Amino acid sequence: MKVRLLGNYLYLCSQERLLMSDKEYQDLNRKLDEGLQIAHQRMLEEKALRDETVVVANSEGKIEYISAKEVLASF
């Protein structure tokens, strides 16, 4: 078993063949992205209900605490 870097992703290879086709990897990546988006949205909604803040890094890399409601409004 070998590991191959293709683009930004590492793939496990067996006898120089990928274990998944490019389409399967794209589908898996899309599903993971969608799941993360849903989880992020739900986390913001729950924090907004409790008037909590979220920690973000601004464009200069400095840590800021912002109201979850404010982040949710721009999400």
Image (cartoon, rainbow, N blue to C red):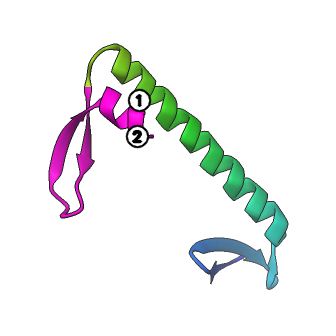
Q: Residues within 10 Å of mark 1 (few under 14, many from 20)?
A: many
Return the x and y of residue 46 as percentages of the image width and height: 41, 20
Which range is magenta?
Answer: 53-75
**Residue 44 against residue 23 in the figure, above or below:** above
Q: Earlier in the sequence, mark 2 or mark 1?
A: 1
**Residue 52 against residue 11 in the figure, above or below:** above
Look at mark 1 in the image and give the residue it sits on: 44
Q: Is residue 60 magenta?
A: yes
**Residue 51 against residue 34 in the figure, above or below:** above
Identify residue type, mark 1: Leu
Look at mark 2 in the image and give the residue it sits on: 74
Mark 1 residue element: helix
Identify residue type, mark 2: Ser
Q: Which picture quadrant has residue 7?
A: bottom right
Q: Residue furthest top?
A: 50
Mark 2 residue element: helix
The quadrant of the rendering that contains the C terminus is top left
Say left or right for 56 vs 2: left
Residue at 24 percent across and 53 percent down: it is 57
Say left or right for 48 vs 55: right
Q: Residues within 10 Å of mark 2 (few under 14, many from 20)?
A: few
Separation of marks 2 and 1 at Cα, in angstroms: 11 Å
Return the x and y of residue 37 as percentages of the image width and height: 55, 42
Residue at 20 percent across and 61 percent down: it is 61
Say left or right for 44 vs 2: left
Return the x and y of residue 42 as percentages of the image width and height: 50, 27
In terms of depth relative to the viewer, which is nearer, 18 or 31? 31
